[in-house]
């Protein structure tokens, strides 16, 4: 299944970002802008104060103004300091809140996606949406907007002051700055590309790490350490290369600005100095002007940097919205449909299905599983057995044909109702890094400890749980590493008992347990099956023989079905499959 990654338009991304992320905090932002205005005004006032400092104090030596001007300078610094603190605090709050909102929204969206989505998006790339991308977006919103607001306002007020002090000089100085913007805008594009590449490779790296560590047993047993090392360093080097390119381009921006700034300052000194010597301007006005120019330099420089920061953030936002815009292929908006209890007769009618478009896995497959009975599905590996179970639980939808439970098309059944009606126990049992009790409680989140113990007893798990260091409160470790294969199976059975769903979907474990554990697990399994519609991918001849009906699948088709006795006398394939003579 391919998800179309449409390229969202930059402007629309920006608008969405403002609407979704920024708008809810508009009141706080207005307050922040208020403080930004104060910062800008005090900055300009400080530059302006250079005029009386030079003219009245230094040149005219007017003692009466000394205290007033000193006081005004001090007062301006205090107000500016307080406003800077208040503005930074508000923006930090807004920035972090936006980060949290976006992460919450993204997670809520992802957890509802279907399996096909997770197949076409690697875990690493999804993780990096949460980390790097959202952090970059937060930077756009907090640092970017702060900078944009504070710096633009500061520059604006300083420029007004400069024009007030000497409009001609100001005009000369400002011819140089716009020229500086052109190469900086060009550099912004290159920064964006480098950032995009770094992001993609970082996502790949996270996926690689995940696979390398999860599959560490495989890596060791096949002595693949060297190979993995090579692969890791290949990706690391790629990231290094892109990051160096990006940083290199960023590194040019600042000195470029500085050089242009230098040209402006030099011009002003020469021309302004000449004006003072000729007495066409006062030294105070000149110093006030040059103070404003130097003060404007820093916010101007960061305004130039903001461009690339916004570009980076928008690249992150684009990836974020691409994910947010993917719709689950499984239509689950069946929420409005009523919840009712299914009893469990199952039928597949002419069902075809392909994971990838060209490879058809099930071909016009039809089968029935009677309510309360056990139906075994047997067949060679790759024949499509697990796929049948995937379709029944609506992890995927068929490309054609209908699957019915209780004579109702499952696509028209409330998805929660459908999944509530099915317990699944597969070979790779999912155990969470939590306590034994919580792991069993997944079957029924409302269950009390007494019900959990009862289920564990039925599953033959109570005895080994009691022997664990903290009984039901024992943490089982990541992926249940503290449990043996047989123990995990019994936890899964206890979970299913607690769930008490009418339909049971089992994928019989192929790895053998020791005979004693096997007996306990089988006993628990048989208890669980009683009275439920069970579909089981069976491997053990014993399970197959006990089933009410056996369906033999080959190459995505049912080739025969019946009881064990019937098939033994009827089907050559069945005999070959189980080597029965
Ligand atoms: P069985 O359970 O009988 O071993 P499966 O139903 O797992 O067979 O697989 C049937 C076919 O579908 C196989 O050819 C397998 O490679 C393919 N297949 C299974 N799962 C996926 C998947 N998630 N994506 C793509 N192809 C898959």
Image: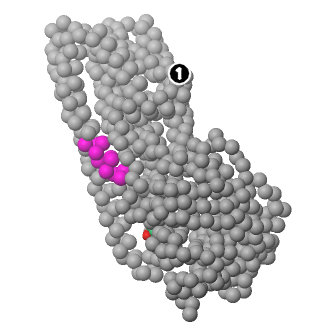
Q: Residue at x 55, y 49 (%)?
A: 112
Q: Nearer the viewer, residue 557 or 227?
A: 557
- Sort mark 1 into few (<14), some (14-19) or many (20+) by Cα contacts within 10 Å: some
Q: Nearer the viewer, residue 332 or 51?
A: 332
Name the spot of residue 60 as percent of width and height, x first. 32, 7
Position of the N terminus, as image quadrant, is bottom left
Q: Residue at x 72, y 49 (%)?
A: 340
Q: Is residue 72 visible?
A: yes
What's drawn in magenta, residue-wise? 190-200
Asked if 8 appears above or below 427 in the picture, the reply is above
Q: Is residue 210 left or right of residue 436?
A: left
Give the residue pinned by disc 1.
31
Q: Residue at x 40, y 76 (%)?
A: 225
Q: Nearer the viewer, residue 311 or 378?
A: 378
View extreme (bottom): residue? 581
The overriding secondary structure of the stretch rendered in magenta is helix
Confirm or reject: label 1 Cβ below 8 Å from ligand 1: no
Position of the C terminus, as image quadrant, is bottom right
Please tell me how many numbered marks the rendered image carries. 1
Asked if 224 appears above or below 4 in the picture, the reply is below
Q: Secondary structure at mark 1?
A: helix
Q: Residue at x 33, y 71 (%)?
A: 230
Asked if 95 appears above or below 161 in the picture, the reply is below
Name the spot of residue 213 as percent of width and height, x first. 48, 68
Asked if 358 appears above or below 164 in the picture, the reply is below
């Amino acid at each position: 299944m391919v998800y179309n990654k449409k390229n969202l338009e930059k402007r629309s991304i920006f608008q969405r970002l403002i609407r979704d992320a920024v708008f809810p905090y508009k009141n706080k932002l207005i307050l922040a802008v208020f403080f930004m205005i104060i910062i800008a005004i005090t900055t300009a006032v400080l530059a302006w104060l250079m005029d009386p400092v030079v003219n009245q104090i230094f040149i005219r030596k007017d003692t009466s103004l000394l205290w007033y001007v000193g006081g005004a300078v001090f007062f301006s610094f205090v107000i500016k300091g307080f406003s800077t603190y208040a503005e930074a605090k508000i923006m930090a709050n807004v920035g972090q809140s936006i980060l949290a909102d976006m992460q919450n929204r993204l997670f809520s969206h992802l957890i509802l996606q279907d399996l096909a989505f997770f197949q076409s998006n690697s875990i690493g790339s999804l993780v990096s949406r949460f980390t790097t991308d959202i952090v970059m977006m937060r930077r756009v919103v907090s640092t970017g907007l702060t900078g944009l607001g504070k710096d633009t306002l500061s520059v604006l007020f300083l420029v007004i002051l400069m024009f007030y002090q000497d409009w001609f000089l100001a005009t000369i100085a400002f011819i140089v700055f716009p020229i500086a913007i052109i190469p900086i805008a060009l550099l912004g594009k290159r920064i964006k590309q480098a950032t995009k590449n770094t992001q993609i490779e970082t996502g790949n790296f996270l996926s690689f790490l995940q696979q390398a560590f999860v599959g560490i047993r495989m890596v060791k047993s096949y002595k693949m350490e060297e190979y993995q090392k090579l692969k890791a360093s290949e990706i690391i080097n790629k990231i290094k290369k892109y990051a160096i390119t990006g940083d290199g381009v960023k590194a040019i921006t600042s000195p470029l600005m500085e050089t242009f700034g230098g040209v402006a300052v030099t011009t002003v000194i020469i021309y302004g100095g000449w004006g003072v010597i000729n007495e066409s301007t006062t030294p105070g006005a000149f110093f006030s002007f040059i103070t404003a120019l130097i003060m404007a330099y820093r916010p101007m420089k960061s305004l130039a940097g903001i461009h690339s920061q916004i570009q980076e953030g928008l690249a992150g936002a684009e990836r974020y919205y691409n994910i947010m815009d993917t719709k689950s292929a499984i239509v689950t908006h069946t929420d409005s449909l009523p919840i009712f209890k299914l009893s469990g007769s199952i039928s597949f009618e002419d069902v075809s299905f392909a994971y990838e478009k060209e490879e058809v896995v099930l071909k016009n497959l039809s089968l029935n599983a009677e309510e309360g009975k056990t139906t075994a599905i047997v067949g060679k590996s790759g024949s499509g057995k697990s796929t049948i179970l995937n379709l029944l639980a609506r992890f995927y939808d068929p490309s054609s044909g209908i699957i019915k439970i209780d004579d109702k098309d499952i696509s028209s059944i409330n998805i929660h109702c459908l999944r509530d009606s099915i317990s699944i126990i597969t070979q790779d049992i999912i155990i969470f890094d939590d306590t034994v009790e919580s792991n069993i409680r997944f079957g029924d989140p409302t269950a009390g400890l007494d019900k959990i113990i009862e289920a564990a007893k039925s599953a033959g798990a109570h005895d080994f749980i009691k022997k664990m260091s903290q009984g039901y409160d024992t943490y089982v470790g990541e992926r249940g590493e503290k449990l043996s294969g047989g123990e995990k199976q019994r936890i899964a059975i206890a979970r299913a008992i607690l769930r008490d769903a009418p339909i049971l979907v089992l994928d019989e474990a192929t790895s053998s347990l020791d005979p004693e554990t096997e007996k306990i697990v089988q006993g628990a399994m048989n208890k669980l099956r009683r009275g439920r519609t069970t579909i089981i991918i069976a491997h053990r001849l014993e399970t197959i023989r006990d089933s009410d009906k056996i369906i033999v699948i080959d190459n995505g088709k049912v080739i025969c079905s019946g009881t064990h006795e019937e098939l033994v006398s009827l089907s050559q394939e069945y005999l070959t499959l189980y080597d029965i003579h």
